[in-house]
Amino acid sequence: MKKLTEQDGSSLNMVNENLEALNAIFPEAFTEDSVDFEVLRQLLGDAVAEGEEKYGLSWHGKKKA
């Protein structure tokens, strides 16, 4: 991965670099041209957040409110 301080006149393509890093860790989650998110979800196990919301508020008595 290139350092962010290096400048060669081109913009950084962080998506491709992240995909390459992910492919190095979980090569079985990649098909020829894309990521198989179902396989990646199985490989990550319980570390995958389910649902639409990433953050939430919860407190005792919330259902009654």
Image (cartoon, grey):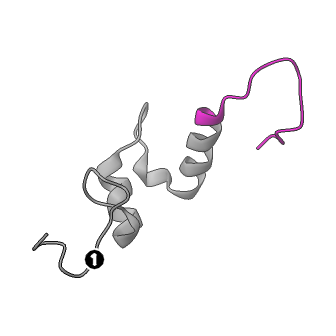
Q: Residue at x 86, y 17 (%)?
A: 9
Left or right? Give the position of 12 relative to 43: right
Residue shown at 65% from the left, 38% from the top: 17
Report the side of 31 relative to 27 (left or right).
left
Q: How many marks?
A: 1
At label 1, the amino acid type is: Trp
The picture places residue 10, in percent across and down from the top left corner, at 79, 19
Up/down of 52 relative to 12, above or below: below
Is most of the magenta stretch helix, strand or loop?
loop
Magenta residues, as a range? 1-16
Viewer-proximal residue among 60 and 37: 60
In x, y percent, where is residue 44? Answer: 41, 65
Query: What element does badge 1 sit on?
Result: loop
Query: Which quadrant, please, contains the C terminus?
Result: bottom left
Residue 48: within the magenta?
A: no
Most extreme residue toward the bottom, as rendered? 60
Give 50 or 62, whichever is nearer the viewer.
62
Say which of 30 and 50 sits in front.
50
List the single residue furthest toward the top: 9
Residue 5 is covered by the magenta coloring = yes
Crowd class of label 1 (few under 14; some 14 to 19; many from 20; radius 10 Å): few
Tell me if 17 is positioned left or right of 35 in this view.
Answer: right
Residue under the image location 76 percent in, 44 percent down:
1
Q: Give the residue number, with chain letter if any, for mark 1.
A: 59
Instruction: Name the spot of residue 8 as percent of width and height, x first.
Output: 89, 22
Image-based side of 62 in relation to 40, left or right: left
Residue furthest out toward the front: 65
Against 52, residue 64 (above or below) is: below
Q: Residue at x 40, y 39 (%)?
A: 31
